[in-house]
Image: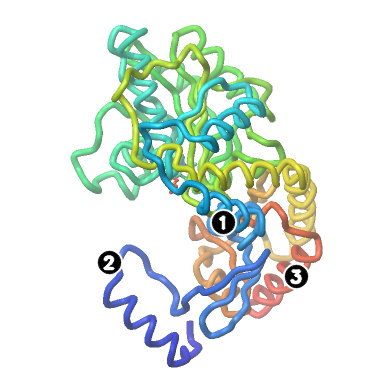
Amino acid sequence: MSIEPDTDTARLLDAGNETILFTANRPDIVMERGEGLYLWDTAGKKYLDFVGGWAVVCLGHSPFAIKKALEKQAATLVNASPAFYNRPMIEFAKRLTEISRFDKVFFASSGAEANEGAIKLARKHGARNRSGAYEIITVKNGFHGRTLATMSATGKQQWAHLYEPKVPGFLQVPFNDIEAMQAAVGSSTCAIMLELVQGEGGVRVAEEAYIAKLRQLCDENGVLLIFDEIQTGLGRTGKMFAYEHYGIQPDIMTLGKGIGGGFPLSAVLTKAEYNLFEAGDQGGTYSGQPLAMAVGIAVLNEIIDQQLADNAEQQGNYILQRLEGMRSKYQFQRISGKGLLIAFDLQEAIGRELVEECMAEGLLINSPHPHTIRLIPPLTVSKAEIDDMFDILTRVMDKRQ
Ligand SMILES: *Cc1c(COP(=O)(O)O)cnc(C)c1O
């Protein structure tokens, strides 16, 4: 950004550039504080946040519910050890199984780690029930995380030759193409894994008939169906879980991002019949960590009590309606979304520039691809905040024309 940072910020940026291992081009600002839909940087500049920590801060920034849960749990029990049950762990697993149709939960800290757990469980199923089948079929343009196995599952073009050799046993077929999937499933297949709405892929929605046929294909072949709901789960798409839009259920579902409202937390949910791990097969130092569990319970209660899935649906529809109204003026090529997971395609590949220009004007939006802008605000967003967002966005876009 062109603005000269103040001396405190400049000092922080120098120290950051010196000591933080480079992995990303970050703008010359340092985030300091958040409240509701807003973030403030160290220079005191305020940002309206339609990225929401990357679809993570579902209750908004610094919600009271998380503060309260952390304070109470930190004063009670921070960590016993993953070898013991603890009270919030049991309570949270019980809550998750009550609001879904799953029976068993494994907790972890990040989305990729949850997907690793799902992959291991699928391979266990293959070893136990399908004479050693190990292959997992995923779809193109999907995203499953950044561990070696989940990068191999993702099959992103840009990652094709990164960190080779890849973890074997993953195969990608085109999305929404049932014939390609039918052709790919064979005796070595143990699972099919995909997102119902491809988030990083630019908000591409799975077709209903496709998902119904995947369910049937899996049933016929004894293959597990895994939905990666790390971005779509917990109210984001207007239902508690995106699979509820499709009238079928997966065998395994992974949750992340919104489940902790910003606290590192993820989960693998499955049916009792896939309770297949033996002692020591799977674990993790922070599996069921009490602070994370207390936060998870608090976040879930807020999502339910404040009816945030309904708000996601209503406000999401309002955003879509506003975008449709702008379509011809700004020549949007595609407008897509479910709930508060929304994207629109620009005629030109100016995504990054638009993100920077909006940031300068105090608005945070995301561009997963050069042609695409994605909006993933907290589920608490109001109509007034959406209007404010469109005021800034249109001002920025008008300046370009
Ligand atoms: C973000 C994301 C992941 C990875 O989650 P991390 O917490 O970054 O490991 C996996 N799958 C989907 C669909 C995601 O959106």
Q: Which residue is mark 1?
A: 71
Q: Secondary structure at mark 3?
A: helix
In this rendering, does residue 55 appear at all?
no
Please, is residue 195 above or below residue 29 in the view?
above
Q: Tag 1 or tag 3, which sits nearer the N-term?
A: 1
Image location (x, y in percent) of residue 146: 35, 46
Q: Ligand 1 near label 3 (Cβ, under 8 Å)? A: no
Please, is residue 363 above or below residue 78 in the view?
below
Query: Looking at the picture, which amino acid does disc 1 mark?
Result: Glu
Circles 2 and 1 in contact, beta carbons < 8 Å: no
Query: Looking at the picture, which amino acid does disc 2 mark?
Result: Leu
Q: Which residue is mark 2?
A: 21
Q: Ligand 1 near label 1 (Cβ, under 8 Å)? A: no
Between the residue at mark 2 and the residue at mark 1, the CA separation in whole angstroms equals 32 Å
Q: Residue furthest left?
A: 165
Q: Which residue is mark 3?
A: 388
Q: Tag 2 or tag 3, which sits nearer the N-term?
A: 2
Between the residue at mark 3 and the residue at mark 1, the CA separation in whole angstroms equals 34 Å
Circles 3 and 1 in contact, beta carbons < 8 Å: no
Q: Residue at x 20, y 43 (%)?
A: 164
Query: Looking at the picture, which amino acid does disc 3 mark?
Result: Asp
Q: Quadrant of residue 26?
A: bottom left
Image location (x, y in percent) of residue 243: 63, 29
Q: Residue at x 33, y 50 (%)?
A: 158
Q: Quadrant of residue 289?
A: top left
Circles 3 and 2 in contact, beta carbons < 8 Å: no
